[in-house]
Amino acid sequence: MRQQLDIFPLDIATGSAFCNRTEEIERLSINIKGVTHTLITAPRRMGKTSLVVETLNRLAIPRLIPVHLDLMLTSSPTSVQQYILKAVGEAISEIKPIASKLNLAGQQLKKALLSLRPQIEITDDGFKIKLEATRTPVESISDALTGLDQLADKHGYRVVFYMDEFQQLADMADNETLEAAIRHAAQHARATAYIFTGSNRHMLSLMFDDSARPLYHLCDKIVIARINTKEYAAYLKDQAKKCWKKPITDTAISAIMECTQQHPYYVNVLCRHLWREKAPPGAKKAKEAWLHYVQYERGRVISDINKLSNNQRELLILIASEPTDTPYAEHYLSRVNFARGSVRNILKALIEQDFILCDQDGFYRVQDPVIETYIRHKQQDSTLIRIRIE
Ligand SMILES: Nc1ncnc2c1ncn2[C@@H]1O[C@H](COP(=O)(O)OP(=O)(O)OP(=O)(O)O)[C@@H](O)[C@H]1O
Ligand SMILES: [Mg+2]
């Protein structure tokens, strides 16, 4: 029981639960070592955090301070400032020479972080560095990040400053000044590699790809997609042998891949369930378990689809039933009722909201396999009510 929870986690996957992503790990490792900043984009639950954590684990750089800042709950520059100051304080506490030479360190801290009135608080476990914001949030953020970098560099440390759900900043008042402060710190960093991730690819693209915005051309970009079928099949076969000492059939593997469309989160949801069985599942069992799960997720799917306009819903349903590489073709659109001229905007809106993606082969398809299965099955449902006569 414990085993499949570890192999197919629903949260961060690392170690033996981590499949493939070899190229992405290599690229991110090179960036971290070379203090090149990285932007990682992918739809929700595609494996961004797992990639960063697994890369850091494999890198095992001595004297590396990894900072993970989840900005999901921030809503103003002041709250971003609080998160960053806390993170910087904690990161500095990891610089060992500071712990052993508190006195000298106090002076260095004061010099590097003058505007933030650094205070060393001795705690039961050691000590804590507290920073106080005395300037505007934007100035404090810039001072704190630059100060951390200087101290790390001086003592031979490296920092990975990983900011998750970074697109939250784009909606804040004074967002461009905030972005400019982060650019300033990142551009002058000598010991800190920044990693930015987020699930709203549209917002991130506005922040990083627009030449008028401060973060333009700051990062190397890694886009993560689904894990390829060959790698996944080999991985699942291996996990089957470990679990049952028996092979799983190719048709069962194909069914798992087809249902989940190699989406790592859904592969884990399904396999976690299947790997509880006493023997390797067949294709039929895998498909039944998937349909059962889609049924269970019905409420969420309906609420997601209900957020769309009628036209958007109509196009989503068409693409779910028939993914296409020619979304504007007359014969393809013959089944929708809205004006042909508006299809470009409708498709754009669906892509921006992550309902539709264009895959590596140029096919437009539904991003979330649960939504796609739900729509396909809804369309096959009989309209007759089966009345039971006793
Ligand atoms: N390389 C991988 N091999 C196997 N499973 C993975 C891999 N990457 C991610 N997963 C699984 O996919 C799911 C999502 O992973 P993770 O939380 O890293 O994604 P995320 O993109 O950071 O998600 P979010 O958008 O919620 O922040 C988890 O169940 C995780 O265990
Ligand atoms: Mg994440």
Image (cartoon, grey):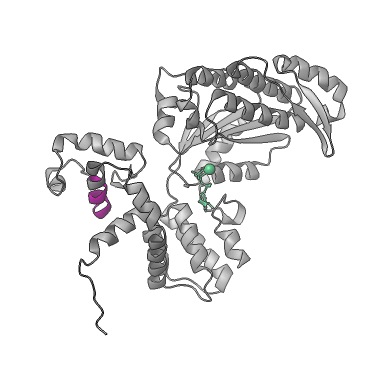
- Measured as percent of width and height from the top left, residue 79 is found at 59, 28
- Measured as percent of width and height from the top left, residue 169 is found at 50, 27
Q: Is residue 52 above or below residue 31?
A: below
Q: Quadrant of the N terminus?
A: bottom right
- Measured as percent of width and height from the top left, residue 283 is found at 39, 70
Instruction: State which quadrant residue 292 falls in.
Output: bottom left
Asked if residue 75 lies left or right of residue 388, the reply is right
Q: Is residue 60 above or below residue 160?
A: below
Q: Quadrant of the C terminus?
A: bottom left
Q: Which residue is situated farthest in the front direction here?
A: 390
Instruction: State which quadrant residue 295 falls in.
Output: bottom left
Q: Is residue 198 above or below residue 187?
A: below
The residue located at (76%, 28%) in the rendering is 129
Asked if residue 327 lies left or right of residue 278, the reply is left
Specify whether residue 210 is in view.
yes
Q: How many numbered circles does the render carry?
A: 0
- Give yes or no for residue 301 being in the magenta stretch: no
- Measured as percent of width and height from the top left, residue 286 is found at 41, 68
Instruction: State which quadrant residue 126 falls in.
Output: top right
Asked if residue 198 lies left or right of residue 106, the reply is left
**Viewer-side residue, 51 vs 81:** 81
Q: Main secondary structure of the magenta part?
A: helix
The residue located at (67%, 19%) in the rendering is 133
Specify whether residue 367 is in view.
no
**Residue range (magenta):** 315-322
The residue located at (39%, 22%) in the rendering is 210
The residue located at (64%, 41%) in the rendering is 59
- Give yes or no for residue 320 being in the magenta stretch: yes
**Viewer-side residue, 134 vs 98:** 134
Q: Which residue is situated farthest in the bottom direction here?
A: 390
